[in-house]
Image (spheres, rainbow, N blue to C red):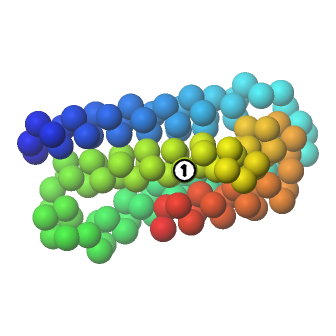
Amino acid sequence: MSEDEVMVTIFCCLGAAGWWLIAGLAPLLSVRRNRSAGSLRAAAAGVAVFCLVLLFAILVSWASHDVRNAPQYLFQYTMMGAFVVGLCTFTFGSLLGISFRDDIIERGNPAATWAGCGAMLGFTL
């Protein structure tokens, strides 16, 4: 990998960690518990993990042979995808008014869960 690719990988790892850990996982654990929202929290977390696994599976199956045969590029592109999905999901609330933290995690809104999970899957694809 060149120096530029290493810098992009580091940037995307930090960005993906920022979304997945700080904006995505931390509210799941810290926001007050709403008994009816437990399954919605699990659905949102499950779809997020599914999207990451789906992205990796697509890279392993259909990416160029240069990517499929190089673990460092598989890692780089997976982190880039995780960063982009996290960024799009984070801005989704600003653009359409559906907040993952407020509507799905805190309030347990089933319609927002469907829209948020669908958006996350759409961003992944």
Residue 26 to residue 74: above or below: above
Task: Please state if 36 lies on the left or on the right of 112 as rendered.
Answer: right
- Residue 75 location (% of width, % of height): 28, 48
Q: Nearer the viewer, residue 56 or 117?
A: 117
Q: Looking at this rendering, what residue extends furthest in the bottom direction?
A: 62
Q: Residue at x 69, y 46 (%)?
A: 93
Q: Residue at x 83, y 27 (%)?
A: 32
Asked if residue 33 can be seen in this view, the reply is: yes
Task: Please state if 65 lies on the left or on the right of 20 as rendered.
Answer: left
- Badge 1 local density, few (<14 within 10 Å), some, or many (20+)? some
- Residue 13 location (% of width, % of height): 36, 36
Look at label 1 and name its amino acid. Answer: Cys
Residue 60, picture quadrant: bottom left
Number of numbered discs: 1
Residue 64, picture quadrant: bottom left
Asked if residue 41 can be seen in this view, the reply is: no
Task: Please state if 117 lies on the left or on the right of 2 as rendered.
Answer: right
- Residue 81 location (% of width, % of height): 40, 53
Q: Looking at this rendering, what residue extends furthest in the left direction?
A: 2
Q: Residue at x 68, y 44 (%)?
A: 94
Task: Please state if 92 lies on the left or on the right of 80 as rendered.
Answer: right
Q: Looking at this rendering, what residue extends furthest in the front direction?
A: 95
* Residue located beneath label 1 in the image: 88
Per the image, label 1 sits on a secondary structure element best described as: helix
- Residue 39 location (% of width, % of height): 80, 50
Q: Residue at x 67, y 58 (%)?
A: 117
In the rendered image, which quarter contains the N terminus? top left
